[in-house]
Image (cartoon, rainbow, N blue to C red):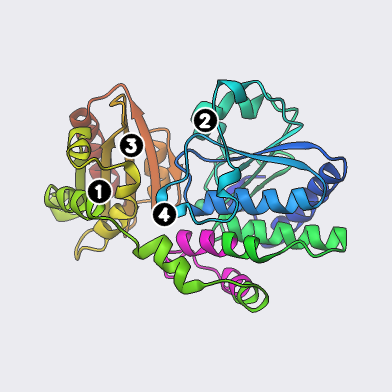
């Protein structure tokens, strides 16, 4: 069955199936690796770390393996210090089970793809669009606000199976952080009543400082970040008669400010909010200048996930991303704009 067509009942079945499997694996004290996507956001890390706490609690030996250190705005997340960074030393680990969270194609694991694939068994929990049949132990539901919303349901099912309390203060902070981020503080169209109920329950039951989370995840900034955002915003241009607002960020522009990629977080979403703009596109050179990363936000008929797929990426209907290799920033810009204009014309 395609993940695009999953209905509510199917998801409930997938959740109880996966929970049963994870419960058995944990009781057998399996060695489990959890893999958030590269350049992990709060949803990916929140999902990975909360699932790690739950499975450990049930007996498994769990490691969360990431490509790089958590972004400064995510350093407060409980358990972030336990994350194992990928290195040659880690490369030959043999997990009994590898679980990908907040991604559904292993190539989004970048350096860790092989480590994931060489595990004996695999599972996926995700909410991004994928045009492929779901396999066993794959829980992919695009109707979920976030991967953390799905992890909440998994942990609830694990609690029922084990007849013990698994949720705790740390899990509450992790899940709320993921849900808040992926829904833009519960303001985007992907916000579900279920996510709101989950958060309400977590706030009732556990110690969570919402104002602190809001500050860390959304409001906290640095002078460097304000400056690079200023540079990028000043360089924006319009295309397609004003329907596309875009900016292309050469690495040199970042280096001049000693800025890092996470300084540009949410910038493409901010650009989308300009009056009259249907699509915003932010392109930036990777730190080693070998790749171009693209971030797309749509206000219109343009399906951002479908658009990103043209470049081997993916995501959601209104927000997506992709990576282009073998093109200069200028070439990528020309190609991406041409495709966006074409798609906008077709969908009107
Ligand atoms: Mn997500």
Mark 2 or 1, closer to the camera:
2
Which residue in the rendered view is the most extreme toward the bottom? 204
Q: Determine the secondary structure under disc 2.
A: helix
Horizontal side of residue 20 vs 207, given as left or right: right
Query: 205 or 281, which is in the foreground?
Result: 205
Ligand 1 contact, mark 3 (Cβ < 8 Å):
no
> Is any part of residue 101 visible from this angle?
no
Where does residue 60 sit, x and y in percent of width and height? Answer: 79, 43
Q: Determine the secondary structure under disc 4.
A: helix
Task: Give the answer, above or below, for where 195 lies relative to 241.
Answer: below
Q: Cβ–Cβ below 8 Å for labels 4 and 1?
A: no
Q: Determine the secondary structure under disc 1.
A: helix
Q: Which residue is mark 1?
A: 345
Q: Tell me which numbered mark, 4 or 2, is placed earlier along the sequence.
A: 4
Disc sitting over residue 107 in the figure = 2
Q: Tell me which numbered mark, 4 or 3, is placed earlier along the sequence.
A: 4
Q: CA distance from mark 4 to mark 2?
A: 25 Å
Q: Which region is colored magenta?
A: 175-199
């Amino acid at each position: 069955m395609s993940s695009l067509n999953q209905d509510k009942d199917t998801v409930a079945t997938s959740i109880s199936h996966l929970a049963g499997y994870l419960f058995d694996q944990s009781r057998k004290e399996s060695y489990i690796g959890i893999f958030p996507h590269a350049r992990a956001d709060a949803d990916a890390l929140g999902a990975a770390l909360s699932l790690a706490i739950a499975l450990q609690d049930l007996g498994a030996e769990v490691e969360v393996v990431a490509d790089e250190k958590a972004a400064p705005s995510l350093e407060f997340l409980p358990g972030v210090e336990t994350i194992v960074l990928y290195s040659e030393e880690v490369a030959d680990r043999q997990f009994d089970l590898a679980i990908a969270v907040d991604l559904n194609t292993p190539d989004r694991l970048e350096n860790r793809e092989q480590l994931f694939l060489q595990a004996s068994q695999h599972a996926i929990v995700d909410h991004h669009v994928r045009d492929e049949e779901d396999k066993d132990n794959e829980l992919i539901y695009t109707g979920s606000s976030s991967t953390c919303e799905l992890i909440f349901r998994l942990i609830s099912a694990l609690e029922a199976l084990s007849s013990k309390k698994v949720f705790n203060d740390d899990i509450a902070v992790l899940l709320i952080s993921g849900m808040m981020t992926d829904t833009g503080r519960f303001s985007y169209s992907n916000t579900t009543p279920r996510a709101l109920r989950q958060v309400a329950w977590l706030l009732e039951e556990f110690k969570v400082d919402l104002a602190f989370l809001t500050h860390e995840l959304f409001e906290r900034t640095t002078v460097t970040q304000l400056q690079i955002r200023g540079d990028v915003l000043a360089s924006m241009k319009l295309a397609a008669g004003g329907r596309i607002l875009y900016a292309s960020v050469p690495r040199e522009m970042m280096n001049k400010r000693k800025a890092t990629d996470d300084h540009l977080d949410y910038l493409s979403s901010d650009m989308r909010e300009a009056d009259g703009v249907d699509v915003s596109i932010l392109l930036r050179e990777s730190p080693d200048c070998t790749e171009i990363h693209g971030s797309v936000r749509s206000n219109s008929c343009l399906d951002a996930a479908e658009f990103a797929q043209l470049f081997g990426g993916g995501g959601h209907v209104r927000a997506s991303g992709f990576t282009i290799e073998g093109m200069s920033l200028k070439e990528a810009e020309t190609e991406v704009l041409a495709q966006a204009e074409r798609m906008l014309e077709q969908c009107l």
